[in-house]
Image (cartoon, helix red, strand yellow):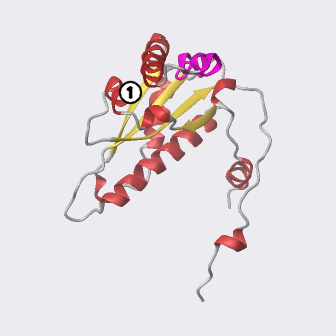
Amino acid sequence: MNPALISYLQGRRSVAANLLDEPGPDDDTIRDILKIASRVPDHGKLAPWRFIVIKGQARERLSAQFAAIALRKDPEMPAERREQEHTRLSRAPVVVAVVSRATRHPKIPEWEQVLSAGAVCTFLYMAANAYGFAANWLTEWIGFDEEALALLGVAEDERLAGFVHIGTSDLVPADRPRPDIDAITTWLT
C-alpha cells in the first residue's frame, strides 16, 4: 500500500484555471510531466495522442484569435464574456493541449485509442500536481470549433482531448459532491 498516493487520490481537486498564477513549470519540468503523461495504457504502442505546449506570448496571441472567432460567431456577446474570451489560454502560465490521433487499426479499436488520450490528460494533471503545481483539465468551445482547432494545428482527422492548464495556487478548493458508489456499482460474484 502507498498511503501518500492513496491520500492524494482521495483528496484530488482541481483549481479553477483563472486562479492559476505564475510560476508555471519550466521547459525541463514540462518535458518530465509529458514523459509521465505518456506512460498511460496504450495498446499496440500506438501513441494515439500528441501534445501542444502553449506558453509565453502564444497564450495571449491565441486567446486574441479565439476571441475574434467567438465575436464573429456571436456579435452580441456581452462584455464580460468578451473579456473571458481574451484570456481563454492566458489564465495559467502553461497550457498543454492533448490531441487524440485515434485511427483505424486492425487490432486496436479506435475507442481504446480515444480512452488512452483521456488517460493522458489524467496522468498529465496528476504529474503536474506531483511536481507541486495546480492544474485544471478543460475542453471548452475551442475544443470543438474547426477554425479554432486549425489555429492550434489540429488536423481534420484529430480531436482535442482537452487543455490542461498548469500553474501555481495556494488555494485549497472546496470538495464537490461525488457519486454514490453503491448507486453506480454492480457486483457480479
Image coordinates of residue 189 in percent, x first then y, are: 60, 89
- Circle 1 sits in a helix, a strand or a loop, which is it? helix
Where on the picture, by quarter, is residue 104?
A: bottom left
In the image, is 22 to the left or to the right of 71?
A: right
Residue 150 lies, with reference to residue 38, above or below; the image says: above
- For the question of whether residue 133 can be seen, the reply is no
Residue 7 lies, with reference to residue 134, above or below; the image says: below
Between 51 and 68, the residue placed more toward the observer is: 68
Between 117 and 78, the residue placed more toward the observer is: 78
Residue at label 1?
A: 148
Image coordinates of residue 96 in percent, x first then y, are: 47, 30
Q: Which residues are magenta?
A: 78-92
- Mark 1 burial class by Cα count in 10 Å: few <14, some 14-19, many 20+: many
Where on the picture, by quarter, is residue 91?
A: top right
Which residue does the image show at 67% across and 39% down from the upper left?
14
The three-letter code of the residue at mark 1 reads Ala
In the image, is 79 to the left or to the right of 46?
A: right
